[in-house]
Amino acid sequence: MKTIIEYQPNITDKNKNISEKYWLRENDNKTSYVFTCRSLSKEYELKQSEITNIVRENACIKVLDCQCLDCGVINECKTRFELTNLDISNWRCDKCLKAFNERQEREWREYILEQERLEQEQHQAIIEGLKRYRAEQEDATPPFGELSLIDKLLLMAIVESLGSDNLKTTLSLADNLQRPLSPLYTMDERVLKHLFEANVLLLKPLDSLDYVDVTESGEIDVDLDYSQATFDFAYDAKDITDLRVKIKDQITINDLIDNVAFRDWCENIQLAECLSYLIERSRINGLAPPLGDKMMSLLQANLTTYSVAELCRMIWMAVESASSYSNKPSITNKHASNSIYTILQSNIDRVTNGTWKRKPFNREVNLPESAIAKVFFDDIFKIFDCGFKYTLDDLIASLGIKRVSKEDSYLTLGRDQDVIKSLTLQLNVN
């Protein structure tokens, strides 16, 4: 570091001597001072602050190899503190520093305004893209009369669970405090996604901004969060109301027996009921059994023989046994959770071979009948909560025994001994 001391023209000899000693350094190192302020104050019988003030007013040290980045003026330090903290390679004089800061602030404001402009442009582009997406959906919406049986039933389930009072829009799954759409969120999502992709549920542009990305080519990529998304119904309230009134009377026996998709949905609804109950009972007992293909295969295979109510009883017993098992020494929570499958399979075998009696469970209050179960089972077979109480084969067989008339109500059919007898032939309802 190259430095030189510059004095005021009228400086006294004493003050010059103080200034020389104040700035005197070993090897011109900026922090290796020969005299401390304390030693100078003792030598001249002055306070340390007085020593600093004398130097500041009468002399300065010029750093010859430190120049302002903008105007080139040589740096001047009035105190040791200034010299110690000086960044030789990155220094601006006060005037240039002020101008630099003002320039930086101006450029930052311009950058922010530009970003806001770009964001507004992108926001508007997304809105326009969503409007085009909505228009394409409306153009592709199937005529109301051409909706498939399954789409009609799924639409009715959504209306039952998520429909707003004016039958124009849906609530979100997260905001729904009424009847659940289905027993499991995965099925909720499947139903909404199916009807959205079928253009029966329409995108709400202004409510969908959080679910949209713009690709590099400017295309709109919609990735909905089905737990939060809301939709518009593609059809007017009158059509939906008419469908709710008439659909129960428009479906024939052959519609049910010959419709593979209807059977698939019914089987999946009953499977979801069992899984939902298994998850809830396990949660209550602090367990978490694997819910992969193995467990689902076991439940599916036995839903042809046993009702959901009966399987729920077997599930309850399996989870309670696993919970007791977890209390044994050296048995971890994971061991107990994994044992649920084996215990459940054993319970089913005992009922099948007659060691245990077949006994159904009543539905638990915290797992009410879902809208999709009501539409696919109650509204079709006209027996309350029949998807829970009976197997699908028993329900379909009952239609061959006696065709349910339009005038029959749930109460009347509940007293129809011919129908009920065919459904409860193998059930011990005690």
Image: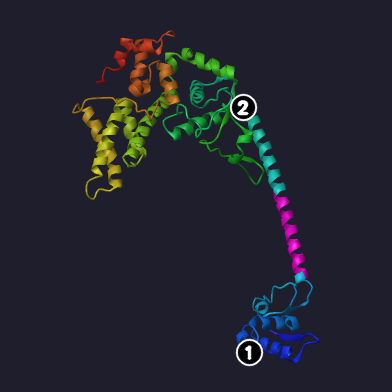
In the rendering, at what x and y percent does residue 152 appear?
51, 21
Above or below 42: residue 430: above
Is 109 magenta? The answer is yes
Over which residues does the magenta segment extend? 95-115
Q: Is residue 247 magenta?
A: no
Question: Which residue in the protein does label 2 denote?
Answer: 140
Q: Earlier in the sequence, mark 2 or mark 1?
A: 1
Q: 304 or 339: which is nearer to us?
A: 339
**What secondary structure do most residues of the magenta stretch adopt?**
helix
Q: Residue at x 30, y 43 (%)?
A: 337
- Residue 72 percent location from the top left of the image: 78, 75
- Position of the N terminus, as image quadrant, is bottom right
**Residue 224 seen in this snapshot:** yes
Where residue 26 is drawn, which disc sits there?
1
Q: Amino acid at mark 2?
A: Ala
Badge 2: how crowded within 10 Å, few (<14), some, or many (20+)? few
